[in-house]
Image (cartoon, rainbow, N blue to C red):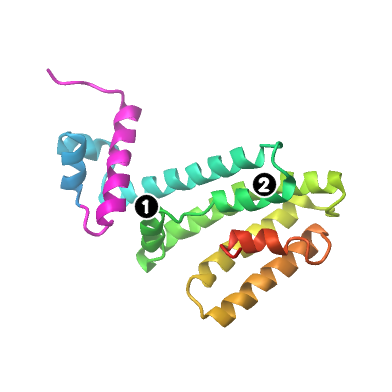
Amino acid sequence: MRVTKEAQERREEILDAAEALFASCGYASTSTNDIIDRVGIARGTLYYHFRSKEEILDAVVLRFTQSLLDRAEQVAADTSVPLYDRIAMTMMALSSDTDLGMELLSCIHKSENALLHQKVQDIMIDKSSAVFARLIEEGNEAGVFSCAYPLEAASMIMTYAYIAFDSSRQIAESERERVIMGFITNTEHLVGAESGSLESVILRIFGIA
């Protein structure tokens, strides 16, 4: 007897299968047949939800992006953790350093996926800025920051962070140090923090103890 599932549940199953295959085999090596076989559906069912493998990639990337943002928001909201620790942990929660995350990053950086890359970047910066604005406001209340425009400062920081993380993976060690130190200095200026107060926090974000 054929099991009929709600459309949204079936769609999520397809995306779950695609995520697992992209992470283990890579996007290029995964076919729609592989996804169909893993879910156990007819080809027509796949195409009812997604017109192509590229459309599946778009949906996987956007779902993965939202999962990072949800995780970051949850971390930021935990006021039992000291503010500076939460800033580092929230930024690290946005990291895509998993097998799936690295594969998706590789995909969206390709020229044919430029529009998807821009869309993801816009979503990440917009939504993460709202999260970090609340942390800056908390810092203002605690007297460790002096920032008149928390949301605008957060947007600038997250835009810079996106570029800094991207470039730090691709440049020489000497240049990477300049990028990181520039990020620290400019972030401190934007939030009105004491010079050097955010250095250890941001070095943790970049994986430097």
**Residue 91 image point, x, y percent:** 60, 53
Dot in front, 1 or 2: 2
Q: Residue at x 47, y 54 (%)?
A: 96
Secondary element type, mark 2: helix
- Per the picture, the main secondary structure of the magenta-coloured stretch is helix
Say which quarter of the image contains residue 206.
Answer: bottom right
Residue 55 relative to residue 97: left or right: left
Tell me how many marks there are: 2
Residue 164: give x, y in percent of width and height: 58, 68
Give the SS element for disc 1.
helix
- On screen, residue 195 versus residue 182, left or right, reads right
- Which residue is under mark 2? 86
**Whole-percent x, y for residue 80 in the image:** 70, 36
* Residue 49: image tag: none
Residue 113 % position (x, y): 38, 61
Q: Residue at x 47, y 74 (%)?
A: 170
Residue identified by numbered label 1: 100
Between disc 1 and disc 2, whose residue precedes? 2
Q: Which residue is more in the foreground, 146 or 80?
A: 80
The answer to whether residue 120 is above or below residue 162 is above
